[in-house]
Amino acid sequence: MSKELDKEYYKAERKAEWRNKLRKEIKSKERTNVVRVQMPEADPNIRNKSNIEVNKGLTLEMAVSESSRCLDCVVPTCVSGCPVGTNIPKFVKYIESGDILGAAKVLKENNSLPAICGRVCPQEIQCEAQCVYVKKLSKEGSAIGYLERFAADYERESGNSSIPELAEPNGIKMAVIGSGPAGLTVAGELAKFGYAVTVFEALHDLGGVLKYGIPEFRLPKDIVDFEINTIKQMGVKFVTNFIVGKTATIDDLKNEGFKAFFV
Ligand code: SF4
């Protein structure tokens, strides 16, 4: 998967003084000699008797070291492999600079589910497969997924979780049918544009396939709930036990003022 990259935008961003300074601190040759981080895993003897998450996440030291591998490329090909166009070099360089909350904010600019995506996106065939390390240097790609998870977890655990910038409310009602990853993503993005979003979920619990399709040891349910809660803080309403077509029809919802529907 690859998308057209706005090269001029990324070139201009890269010229920021803090990025220039950071790049000069370590020579590219030294950066490419850093060994890719290994994800720490829970003890198999504990895992086989419980449902705890297998991947434990990076330490701050590991994350800063891994972020130093990133070359802050003039043309960040990694971004073209990201379905939501995350500004990868910017968030990675924030981690290298030690501003982890800054990194988390960059992630949330166009992705309301960074802790989830950092765990379950197939980065090895998306962003990481497009990294210059893979494309040109025949090395393992920058561990973008691990770093995404690190920044999102760090922010959550810090108690200083931010919500993205929201446009002024425009009063236009939008209905999202289903609270799985697609519905949550659309709800979060529409909320940023100021729409009045309601998510209708047929089941009693929110999250769709994120809850019933991915096991706890791969994606803990409290992580899903935390990110749904962030979307709630952005003003999105959630209604459970509501089957569109049965509890109410599309026409009923249109009569209630909903202007568009995402199914
Ligand atoms: S392609 Fe790889 S090295 Fe270059 S900016 Fe993206 S993550 Fe960093």
Image (spheres, rainbow, N blue to C red):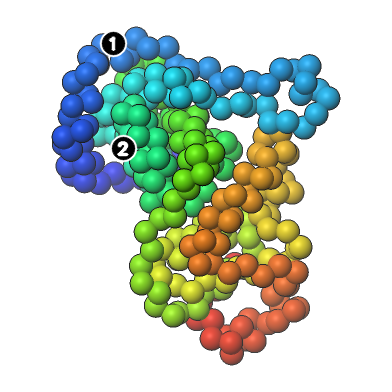
Identify the residue position indicated by label 1 in the image: 30
Q: How far apart are marks 1 and 2 (CA)?
A: 20 Å
The picture quadrant where one finds residue 201 is: bottom right
Three-letter amino acid code at the position of disc 2: Lys
Identity of the residue drawn at 60% across and 49% down? 226
* Front position in the image: 134 or 121: 121
10 is higher (above) or lower (below) than 70 = below
Q: Where is residue 68 in the image (x, y as percent from the top left)?
A: 34, 21
176 is higher (above) or lower (below) than 220 = below
Q: Position of residue 170 (x, y in %)?
A: 39, 77
260 is higher (above) or lower (below) than 213 = below
Q: What element carries label 1?
A: helix
190 is higher (above) or lower (below) than 22 = below
Q: Where is residue 69 in the image (x, y as percent from the top left)?
A: 35, 20
Q: Residue 90 carries which label?
A: 2
Identity of the residue drawn at 36% across and 72% down? 168
Mark 1 or 2, nearer chain start: 1
- Which quadrant of the figure contains the C terminus? bottom right
